[in-house]
Image (tube, grey):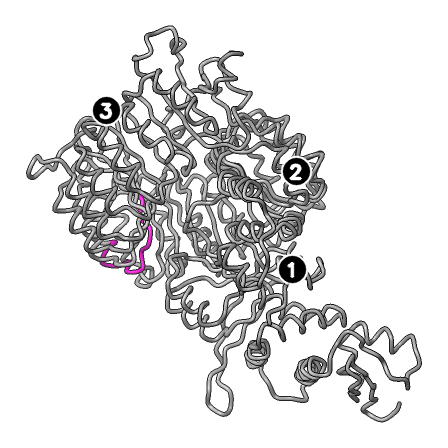
Amino acid sequence: MGSTSTKIKLRTSDQKVFEVEKAVAVQSQTIKYIYENGCPDSVIHVHSVSGDILSKILDYCKKHVNSAAGKEDISPEELYEWDANFVKVDQNTLFDLILAANCLKIESLLDLTCQTVANMIKGKRPEEIRTTFNIKNDYTIEAEEAVRRENKWAFDMLGGVGTMVIEELADDTMSKCVTNTKSRVCVIAANQIVMMRSISKLANKKSIDVYKQPQNPTTPRIKESVKQRNVGTGFIELFFHFKCKM
Amino acid sequence: MQKEMAYSFPDEVLKHVFSFIQSDKDRNAVSLVCKSWYEIERWCRRKVFIGNCYAVSPRMVIRRFPEVRSIELKGKPHFADFNLVPDGWGGYVLQWIAEMAGAYPWLGEIRLKRMVVTDESLELIAKSFKNFKVLVLFSCEGFSTDGLAAIAASCKNLRELDLRESEVDDLSGHWLAQFPETCTSLVSLNISCLGSDEVSFSALERLVDRCPNLRSLQLNRAVTLDKIANILRRAPQLVDFGTGNYAAELQPDVFSNLAGAFSSCKELKSLSGFWDVVPAYLPALYSICPRLTSLNLSYATIQSPDLIKLVSHCPRLQRLLFLIQVLDYVEDSGLEELASSCKDLQELRVFPSDPFGVEPNVSLTEQGLVAVSLGCPKLQSVLYFCRRMSNAALVTIAQNCPNLTRFRLCIIEPKTPDYLTLDPLDAGFGAIVEHCKDLRRLSLSGLLTDHVFEYIGTYGKKLEMLSVAFAGDSDLGLHHVLSGCESLRKLEIRDCPFGDKALLANAAKLETMRSLWMSSCAVSFGACKLLGQKMPKLNVEVIDETEPPDSRPESYPVDKLYIYKSVAGPRFDMPPFVWSMDEAVKILH
């Protein structure tokens, strides 16, 4: 058993070198693979990632490793909040983070960043999406009209009020949705990054059942019970416990 | 400088982004952004909703979305519920199943509403989809317990089998025994529509026993009260329960057994069933009443005093009750009690116990609804049958409940005026559309002139579905609705003096709606033909069971008319009494 912190060296596309704890670096499946199948002392090249981006990514990995190992006293909810702030960056940086998370194979970061981009798409019209992401419309007028017609004529749902599915929105938008919802049931998507505290408070006030979709989409929805617990310092934290026995 | 996203992201990343986008509306928007997004999106769309099964063909759906896992289809027009759509009209699901069997081996969920489902279809489902999990047949018909047996036997991981309000041919009660002993995955089972003697109770008990995740169970009338306790004790985790028959001679041991069984169900929040209810057994429910959010007593001939007792003996029931459906035996007094106890009520449905009787058999009037509107400010959805109404009452209701999204009022006798003033009810319904700015669904009744449609056209900007019967004076009424209601998607009309002018003047509007139904109105055959010519992308179908429409003068009104937009063109499964106004089809017919 070696020293408690084995270090791995990483060199970025702009020739910056980072020395990181192994536990942090192997959050990336790519780095893990290279490390385990190569020479443990050599420097790993992460060609497609710049120093700035890697620095941020390592912050992310470190935070998550420390919280999982209990090295940092941070509640799941506080971690959610930290993640939400982590992705409050300009669009270029966000895209760089996604590409880096994809090539470094860091699943939770990829989920986080993709969810953030998905948020930027939801509720928008096609023109608005194009503007947001600077995408050129390469449809011909006829082709676009044909797709539009098929969408509206075949695959269109009425307003409907049944179950409102909250699929990731920014926290304040989510709060607004829950406040305004006329539904009795809210289903929160699996990779939801939310301020559970504010949502559950609102949900309780409105007697809405809050269901959180599990990671595995084939299992049925699991009701999460909201528990309140007094922590020694005197403030109340909200925890979500899964009641599923499957 | 902003990066161009479409070019810098690999497909798998975009796919991952899209996996967080579930709603049809958002997915449709994504598909229109650019051609590459269209391609990526269509390969990863897993859930498809088709509001009119004739608006698109199975082939087109499969071609566009090759990897669908869940599909929902609706067939017959809504007025089929009132026997206005003749048998054999259509809505057959077999062709869909047959094509999907080849294209979607991983299809896991099928939800159908108002469709004709045969045993052949069910057997095909059972055979073709190895990962089949959810079958919901809402208001469907055409199948028997043989088909159900095939589903039970083959679908190893079945999670949901919901047959609500369907018509099933009873051939054998033993289909439940076809679930293999290894099937432990059921989460939801609704067999409430099966006629008597169709259920093998021991098979049901064993099934419930081995499915620890069963959350929702609706039994049918064959299951007697004494058996309920056995079922509940085997499934204390139930959230939603529909009793069978709730009648028996009052026996203390049966009662205490039942009460004990109910109290062991700590998660129970929703109740229904209660056929032939014996009021003496209602107190067995008291232990769970504080948790109830939904109570459906629409099959229970429960009298008002018993309802009041039920509600008042459960001091906390009021906070949680969201939906209640009762027969109008409940009377005004019962509704007044409800209004004072159940402050969180969101949905109320009051069905008529004797709709065909001439004299009112119970004291249920507009006062009951007014009381509920006053006492329950969260009221959003109303379906109310009654025999009299006044403009004043409607105005009061509108002012008390501005959050209404669905308002369906059925005054049983057509063309009934305001009972106080003998005026039409235009002003009352006008107040409803004016005050309830989020109103999405409206059903009218009573004496109504063109004025009510003027109000609806002016204020009903979010109205999506409108049902009209025995109302209006002239085409102007229809014109107001078609030209004013921007969000209108479904319009169904019977017995109104609406004719050609408004329809032809607003032909383009029909391409923005899902469907239009008109029966016993004044639309001529000539106008239907013209509409078919002018609007080739609409399917204009004339229904006449007595004789072909072209055997009469063109000015003669058609019996029934159903118009809907479709990207699939005219359908090929029309019965002899349905005529398409599509030029090409007409020649062949």
Name which of mark 2 and mark 1 comes first in the sequence.
Answer: 1
Element at badge 3? loop
Residue under label 2, please give it. B63
B84 sits left or right of A56 in the view: left
As rendered, which of B441 and B416 lies closer to the eye? B441
Q: Residue at (10%, 37%) from the top-left corner?
A: B419
**Relative image position of residue A150 (x, y in whole percent):** 54, 39
Crowdedness of circle 1 by 10 Å Cα count: few (<14), some, many (20+)? some
Element at badge 2? helix
Q: Is residue B341 magenta?
A: yes
**Relative image position of residue A44 (x, y in whole percent):** 85, 80
Measure the C-alpha gap from mark 3 to mark 1: 55 Å
Measure the C-alpha gap from mark 2 to mark 3: 43 Å
Q: Residue at (19%, 41%) from the top-left corner?
A: B364
Q: Can you tell which of label 3 and label 1 is closer to the viewer?
A: 1
Start and end of the magenta stretch?
Answer: B338-350
Name which of mark 3 and mark 1 comes first in the sequence.
Answer: 1
Element at badge 1? helix
Amino acid type for the residue under numbered disc 2: Arg
Which chain does the residue under circle 1 lie in? B
Residue under label 3, please give it. B497
**Relative image position of residue B310 (x, y in whole percent):** 30, 53
Amino acid type for the residue under numbered disc 3: Pro
Crowdedness of circle 2 by 10 Å Cα count: few (<14), some, many (20+)? few
Say which quarter of the image contains residue B338. bottom left
